[in-house]
Image (cartoon, rainbow, N blue to C red):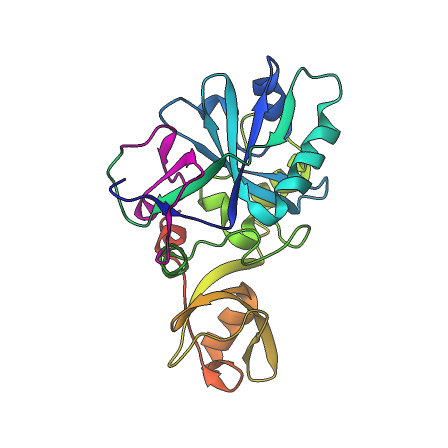
Amino acid sequence: MSEHLLLPDRAVVEVTGEDRRPFLQGIITQDIERLTPESAIFSALLTPQGKILADFFVIDAGEAFLIDCDKANAAVLVKRLTLYKLRAKVAIKVDDGLCVIAGAGQTERNDIFDYQDPRHEALGWRAIAPVGDHDVNDAYDAQRISLGVAEFGKDFSADEKFLSDVNYDALNAVSYKKGCFIGQEVSSRMKRKGGVRRRTLVAECDGPAPAPGASVTAGDATLGEVMSGAANVALANVRLDRWEKAKSEGTPVECGGKALRLRIPAYLEQD
């Protein structure tokens, strides 16, 4: 990366010990065997009922795995992972000496522990770096929102959403072939039966984006709610059947009395 641009709401959790690979493989949604020193994986930790408890990137740092996660949830994630370790020979802690840097859309690699964002190539490279005097990356959220990429901590909280609600099944967060993970039964059943009722869409409006949590409506029907926004664009978590009905009936979609234009993210159309 040509510049070190800090993501201040991210933290780094370190997982060490000889059992770190099988330990994570048994609980997270993505296949740890896809992880290499040159590429990271994006994954999630679910409840047994299939709801997301955390999302994160896992990086192979040689003698340790580094987990790039939501800073406000880092201590909770450590506690949850520790609960699952049982007799596994692993140690888990937040590393306060490391931070996460990124450059939206940048493709140059110069940092140790750097990796292409595995969710979407247009999100560019991220890296784990020593804490220092880094400028804040002000462009990152606008970029991910325009692409239709939701994030834990900014768009939803623990035990609120299924993987498909936030399009994680189309953003390389889950392997349905790797074997067991917590919440696998529910997630796999939804995948097999095609039971996707909600998706995260891109919402555009004239003027500033609506506040998070604002209702998205069409006539008397509530389609969903707004998530995070930047400028005149936001993410919206929407019931697909109600949106399709509104389109078929020609009912305008609104939020707070203002017109809202919904679109499916391009990566979801290609999935």
How far across and down, in percent of the image, does residue 62 sit?
A: 45, 17
How far across and down, in percent of the image, does residue 11 sit?
A: 53, 41
Residue at the image position 67 percent from the left and 43 percent from the top = 50
Residue 250 magenta:
no
Residue at the image position 61 percent from the left and 38 percent from the top = 188
How far across and down, in percent of the image, does residue 241 sit?
A: 55, 66
Identify the magenta region.
110-139
How many numbered marks, from 0 up? 0
Quarter of the image where the N terminus is located: top left
Up/down of 270 relative to 154, above or below: above
219 or 46: which is nearer to us?
A: 46
Up/down of 263 relative to 52, above or below: below
Residue at the image position 51 percent from the left and 34 percent from the top = 97
Evaluate whether residue 235 shows in this view. Answer: no
Q: In which quarter of the image is residue 102?
A: top left
Residue 133 magenta:
yes
How far across and down, in percent of the image, does residue 191 sit?
A: 57, 43
Residue lying furthest front in this view?
Answer: 133
Residue at the image position 55 percent from the left and 36 percent from the top = 96
